[in-house]
Image: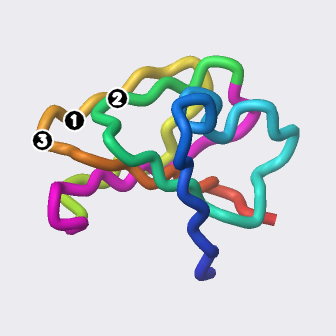
Amino acid sequence: MDLPIVVADTPGRRLRGLLGHRRPPPYALRLEGCRCVHTFGMRFALDLHWLDASGAVIRVDRGVGPGRVRACLRARAIVEVPCDPP
């Protein structure tokens, strides 16, 4: 399934990420300028696609559940993809 990608373009949107959704949203979220994410307070798992400065995928963490922290120091952006989109 292809999901549209929404860009978190403010510090508040980057900080909030997909937190607060009771169900997986019908989109993925791109976090610019991020090398680390947490899933504290999330209600669903995420696939994390780590991007380098050119936008190429350098790593994918699948099924990252709630209450986790992941980081990739080479990353310059992250795309959070709900594991079970609606």
Instruction: Work out whether mark 3 precedes mark 2 in sequence or the reverse, and give the earlier one.
Output: 2
Instruction: Work out whether mark 2 precedes mark 1 in sequence or the reverse, and give the earlier one.
Output: 2
Relative vertical location of residue 83 with respect to residue 11 in this rendering, above or below? below
Residue beneath label 1, please?
Answer: 72
Q: Amino acid at mark 2?
A: Cys
Overall secondary structure of the magenta stretch?
loop
Identity of the residue furthest to the bottom in this view:
2
Separation (CA) of disc 3 from disc 1: 6 Å
Residue beneath label 2, please?
Answer: 36
Q: Amino acid at mark 1?
A: Cys
Q: Amino acid at mark 3?
A: Arg
Relative vertical location of residue 78 with respect to residue 72 in this rendering, above or below? below
**Disc 3 + disc 1, Cβ < 8 Å:** yes
Q: Which residue lies at the image location 54% right of the left edge and 57% below the top edge?
A: 7
Q: Quadrant of residue 73?
A: top left
Asked which secondary structure carries label 1, the reply is: loop
Residue beneath label 3, please?
Answer: 74
Q: Say which of 32 and 44 sits in front.
A: 32
**Disc 2 + disc 1, Cβ < 8 Å:** yes
Q: Which residue lies at the image location 23% right of the left edge and 53% below the top edge?
A: 59
**Whole-percent x, y for residue 78 in the image:** 38, 49
Identity of the residue furthest to the right in this view:
22
Asked which secondary structure carries label 2, the reply is: strand
